[in-house]
Structure formats: C-alpha cells, structure tokens
C-alpha cells in the first residue's frame, strides 16, 4: 500500500467534536516524545505533516488527518483517517491536565465507532515500562484492538532493541493469550515503514 495524499483536517478537544465517522480510522498514541508525530510523517512521506518537537507535550488535541491510499488489492484509491493523539507520562503535567487528558482519551477510544485499531508506540531503547503496559491493559479492558510499534530503533544497538522487544513480549504473554502485532521502526531511517503500511492495508481491505 502507498499513501498518495495526506492532509491535516482538524484538531478536536473531545470525541464529540471529531469529524463525521464515515471511514476507517487508526490512532497513534504512546509516551510523550516517543516519536508519534515523526512516525506519522514517515508513513505519509511528508516531514512537516504532524508537528514534531524535541520537547515533550507538543501534541495536545485529537488531530485528524485525511489520508488517501492506493493498493494493488483494490481498484479505486481509498480514504481513511489517521489520528495523532497527545502522549501520556509527561512528568511536568499538572493533575488537572492529566485528568483532562484521561477523559479525552477514554471518551475518544471507547466511543469512536469507526476506530479500527490503535497503534501504541513504545521506545525501543528502553526495557518495558510500566506505564506502557498499563495503558495496553486498559485498552484490553475497553476491548480496543491495538498493535505495538517500537520507535527510534536507530538510536540503540540491534541487540539491545531485540532484547527490549523480547522482554515486552514476555510480559505481555502473562496477560494475553494472543499477542498483538509488533513492529520495529525508525522514522529517521524509514525502517519498518513497509511492514506498518502492509498491516494497515490488510486492516483496510480485508
Ligand atoms: P509529543 O507529541 O510531544 O508527545 O511527541 P511525539 O511522540 O509526537 O514525538 P515527536 O515525533 O515529536 O518526536 C520527539 C523527538 O524524537 C523529536 O526530536 C524527533 O526528531 C525524535 N525522533 C522521533 N522518532 C525518531 C526516530 O525514529 N529516530 C530518531 N533518531 N529520532 C526520532
Ligand atoms: Mg506529537
């Protein structure tokens, strides 16, 4: 699959302000600064589509992008929504902003009827983090389907990345009988791009 058009549409403060749910939707979430916006730009071949920043907490609303893709499996190009969500786990956030974030995210994830799957982004440089596992468990409790994307793989030795991925799968096995799909990526090197696009294609066309 190839993304032929990607354009920013709208930023919404809550689920009910989101665009009409008239097509499939995929959302990207993870710790602040994990590389969500960079990954979206890499997938869409557009370095300036989603705003990236070296300081965490850049993305604050539910950001919708209109995507047009083409696939050898279907004749016509098809449309879907891609969503960049604000990250969790930024230490400097106040209690009240955190609660606001929780409400916004829970409302969106549980009520957005066209949401096909969520991508939970995890920093490939670190050993499994409690906050990521807790978030995935929450998704499981809400019955929201998700896949895991390891980011920034270029910043660590391949052996370390492999060890971190394996450690995460081991921990996940303790909670789930079936593991979600896993992808290892680098937005700077474009690693893992085809794998993620193929997964999106399968979800959208099958
Ligand atoms: P928030 O919206 O603030 O939560 O951040 P985010 O998750 O959208 O992260 P963003 O894409 O803004 O990236 C954060 C920082 O990490 C930026 O300085 C990026 O350039 C850098 N970065 C993101 N992905 C990669 C990657 O794959 N490799 C490397 N080397 N740097 C990356
Ligand atoms: Mg961002």
Image (tube, rainbow, N blue to C red):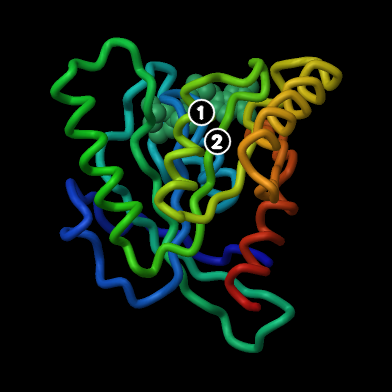
Nearer-N-terminus badge (1/2) = 2
Q: Toward the viewer: 113 or 42?
A: 113
Relative vertical location of residue 28 with respect to residue 31 in this rendering, above or below: below
Residue 196 position within the rendered picture, expressed as x and y whole percent measured from the top left: 67, 52
Disc number placed over residue 132 in the picture, else none: 1
Relative vertical location of residue 4 with respect to residue 172 in this rendering, above or below: below
Asked if residue 157 shows in the view, the reply is: yes
Q: Secondary structure at mark 2?
A: strand
Q: Toward the viewer: 75 or 129?
A: 129
Residue 123 position within the rendered picture, expressed as x and y whole percent measured from the top left: 60, 24
Residue 132 position within the rendered picture, expressed as x and y whole percent measured from the top left: 51, 28
Q: Secondary structure at mark 1?
A: helix
User: Residue at point 70% right, 42% down?
Assistant: 183
Q: Toward the viewer: 52 or 19?
A: 19
Residue 103 position within the rendered picture, expressed as x and y whole percent measured from the top left: 21, 40
Disc number placed over residue 121 in the picture, else none: 2
Relative vertical location of residue 58 with respect to residue 203 in this rendering, above or below: above
User: Residue at point 70% right, 40% down?
Assistant: 190
The residue sitting at the bottom extreme is 75
């Amino acid at each position: 699959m190839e993304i032929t058009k990607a354009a920013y549409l709208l930023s919404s403060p809550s689920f009910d302000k989101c665009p009409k749910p008239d097509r499939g939707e995929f959302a990207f979430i993870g710790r602040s600064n994990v590389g969500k916006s960079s990954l979206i730009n890499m997938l869409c071949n557009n370095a300036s589509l989603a705003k990236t920043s070296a300081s965490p907490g850049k993305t604050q609303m539910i950001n919708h992008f209109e995507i047009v893709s083409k696939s050898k499996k279907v004749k016509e190009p098809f449309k879907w929504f891609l969503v960049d969500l604000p990250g969790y786990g930024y230490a400097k956030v106040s209690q009240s902003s955190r609660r606001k974030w929780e409400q916004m995210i829970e409302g969106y994830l549980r009520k957005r009827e066209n949401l096909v799957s969520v991508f939970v982004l995890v920093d490939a440089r670190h050993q499994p983090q409690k906050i990521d596992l807790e978030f995935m468990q929450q998704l499981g409790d809400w019955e929201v389907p998700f896949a895991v994307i390891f980011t920034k793989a270029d910043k660590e030795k391949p052996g370390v990345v492999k060890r971190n991925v394996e450690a995460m799968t081991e921990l996940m096995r303790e909670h789930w009988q079936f593991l979600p799909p896993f992808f290892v990526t680098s937005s700077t090197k474009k690693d893992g791009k085809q794998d993620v696009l193929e997964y999106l294609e399968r979800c959208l066309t099958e």
